[in-house]
Image (cartoon, coloured by chain):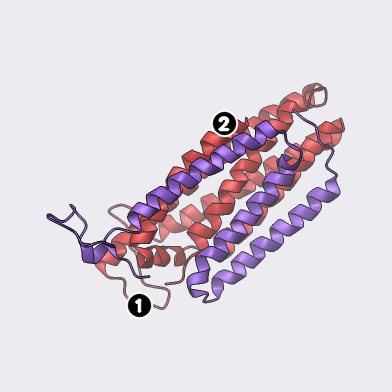
Amino acid sequence: MSHPNVSPRTYLLVFGALILLTGTTYLLSGQHLGGWELPMALGIACTKTVLVGLFFMHLLYGSRLTWVVVATGVVFLGIMLVLTMSDYATRGWLPERGAPQPGVRASESVVTP
Amino acid sequence: MWVFLGSEVLFFGGLFTAYAVLRWRFPHGFALGSSKLSAEVGAVNTAVLLTSSLTMALAVYAASVRNKALLLLFLALTMLLGAGFIGIKAWEWHHEYVEHLVPGAGFDAGKGPDGSVIDRDEARHVEMFFVFYFTITGLHALHMLVGLGVLAVQLFLAARGNFGIADDTPIELAGLYWHFVDIVWIFVFPLLYLLRQV
């Protein structure tokens, strides 16, 4: 294990930023952001994750092997999310031939939020 | 440890993916479900957990500079804050139990945030939201309990001898796990509590 010498001051600054971001995302949820609601909430969550990972978990000072493992986790999570949603989100885009899919009507699967 | 955390990403990732699919399908019911939770309590609990991550990082720091008194202090503080988080969560669960929001025969979706009536189909979607809510927060709390157990053992060993001071790797690894569980909550909080725009 590497032993980076991160000062408590850095930790306190990162902690301050995390609390600030939490407050921001909480206040934003009360506004009517429309289509921006999800991207804003997830963007802030991702920023917080990067802060925790880089500083609290010492990724900033981590070895390349650690980065490869982290990247693998993120990439596979991305594959799972993107491929799954690209299926569910696009159902009903094309006219169906033959029997309709069980349980899903074409008119139902196009969701307009 | 990182490889284990990588597998944990996919464990929680699977839950979040299932949640995303159903939220996509029933956006209205899920937003209604979110609006039934208290964003204030969720935000406070997020702050408690973030503070515990700070004290955990400071415990790792104390171990790396071989300061036993500080290490014991910050390990104890982290446990205290972690227990506080679970306490607040348990209080929330109890509140939801009283409000008939636990999925099952006794489930009652109640009324919308503006007092509107929720019809039968919509109520099923709100119930679906709460299935995810209890599964995800429950599994997260289980991870917290495991973390608390690890910290309790480390605190005990560190108080008895020079555990953590002679070699700070175990403290560092416990810290990684603790921060990971924090990161899971960083996503749970907005996804379950904040997306309430009906």
Q: Position of residue B134 (x, y in %)?
A: 43, 50
Residue under label 1, please give it: B116
- Crowding at dot 1, Cα within 10 Å, few <14 / some 14-19 / many 20+, comes out as few
Q: What amino acid type is highlighted by mark number 2?
A: Phe
| Quadrant where the N terminus of chain B is found in the figure | top right
Please tell me which residue is depicted at 81% across the width and 36% down the height of the picture: A4
Nearer to us of marks 2 and 1 is 2
Chain of the residue under the numbered disc 1 shown in the image: B
Closest to the observer: A50 or B91? A50
Vertical order, B40 against B173 (above or below)? below
Classify mark 1: helix, strand or loop.
loop
- Chain B visual colour: red
Image-based side of A13 in relation to B122, left or right: right
Please tell me which residue is depicted at 61% across the width and 41% down the height of the picture: B180
Please tell me which residue is depicted at 35% across the width and 58% down the height of the picture: A89
Q: Quadrant of residue B125?
A: bottom left
Tags 2 and 1 on a common chain: yes
Tags 2 and 1 in contact by the CB under 8 Å rule?
no
Of marks 2 and 1, which one's residue comes earlier in the chain?
2
**In the picture, which chain is purple?**
A
Image-based side of B134 in relation to B154, left or right: left
Which of the numbered marks, if any, corresponds to residue A58?
none
Q: What amino acid type is highlighted by mark number 1?
A: Ser
Closest to the observer: A83 or B60? A83
The CA span between labels 2 and 1 is 46 Å
Residue B177 visible from this viewpoint:
yes
Which of the numbered marks, if any, corresponds to residue B4?
2
